[in-house]
Amino acid sequence: MSACFEQFQALSELSEGCRQLLFSSHWYGFLPTLEKGTVTIISKKDNEHLFDLINLESYREEIKQLVRESRGKLPFDIRIKSMNDFTQSLLSSATGENPYNWLICEGSSERIYLSAYFDDLIKNNNLRIVPVGGASEIKKIYNYLSACYKDVEGEITGKIYLLADTDSQLVRYEVAEHQKLYCKRFVYDPNSDRAILVRIDSNPVSPATEIEDVLNAKVYYETLLSFVSDYSYLGFVSGMSVPDEGLESFSALDLKLSEKEAITRFFDADNNKFKFARKYVELMSEENSIPSWINEIREVMTRS
């Protein structure tokens, strides 16, 4: 399998120097290793060929969506292979002298923030950030990985970090102690007035905390302000004071219940989570303080 990775890595490097590179494969293991591109899944039904186009930036999410839209009729082997080959790819690629490191998150908006904060690790440390489509998918992937991790533990040289938020309806499951396999969630901690990283099965389990709650408060405010002209119900943001640079967004904005509901309404509309994330990383700079939970993940991913 390591030879397969080397071949696909060579194809990826080759694609950087040309307009378009086409190849075919029956192996799904390359999917998480490529940052850019599209994959066409060809299947056959009633003597008719079907074509599904998937964006590699969010392929786990898109496969999940295809299963949902097809009401479970997406070919069974694709669903099984996409999970089996994905988890095998994570483990296989995390071995050797120059291993990949993996940060598995819930959705595409999370990937945007994490890619911006860990841009140097993506370029220099073989870090790959993959959104998988929700907490239930993270649970499924962790269980797959954990079940076979002990068999390859001595060969793992890279890190695999699964990261979830804290939902109001928390998806809980047991998490074992592994040397290079981590599964954590972020949650706001009132004692430290910032987000902390805890094991999935640990306390605290509240308050509900999403990625937008644990960002740099100043950049969060500036980003939200940029949407006021298009969403009049966010007008109250214009009258707010600029929050302190060192705070995180959950605690920095002293919001009324109606204002919190307005922000929730905004994030639930028009693919705004994705748009907000794009604007946030556009506005952030090296001068902005970095949330402590980001630094904690960085320390893990760069640890010898």
Image (cartoon, rainbow, N blue to C red):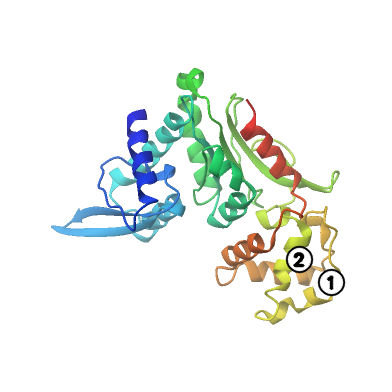
**How far, Cα to Cα, is label 1 from label 2?**
9 Å
Residue nearest the viewer, comparing 264 with 72: 264
Q: Is residue 29 visible?
A: no
Horizontal side of 197 relative to 87 (left or right) equals right
Is the N terminus in the top left, top right, bottom left or bottom right quadrant? top left
Residue occupied by mark 2: 221
State which quadrant residue 161 falls in: top right
Q: Is residue 302 visible?
A: yes
The disc labelled 1 sits on which kind of residue? Met
Q: Please report the residue visible at 65 percent of the width from the left and 33 percent of the height from the top.
A: 300
Is the C terminus in the top left, top right, bottom left or bottom right quadrant? top right
Numbered circle sitting on residue 30 = none
Q: In the image, residue 84 lies at what x, y percent? A: 38, 36
Q: Is residue 32 above or below residue 156?
A: below
Q: Which residue reaches farthest top? A: 154
Are the residues at dot 1 and dot 2 in contact (C-beta closer than 8 Å)? yes
Q: Which residue reaches farthest front? A: 17
Residue occupied by mark 1: 240
Q: In the image, residue 71 lies at what x, y percent? A: 35, 58
How would you rate the neighbour count of disc 1 (Cα within 10 Å): few for under 14, some for 14-19, many for 20 or more? few
Q: Which residue reaches farthest left? A: 47
How would you rate the neighbour count of disc 2 (Cα within 10 Å): few for under 14, some for 14-19, many for 20 or more? many
Q: Please report the residue visible at 71 percent of the width from the left and 57 percent of the height from the top.
A: 285
Residue nearest the viewer, comparing 301 with 66: 301
Q: In the image, residue 93 lies at what x, y percent? A: 44, 32
The disc labelled 2 sits on which kind of residue? Tyr
SS for dot 2: helix
Q: In the image, residue 65 lies at what x, y percent? A: 42, 57
The numbered mark, 1 or 2, whose residue comes first in the sequence reads: 2
SS for dot 1: loop
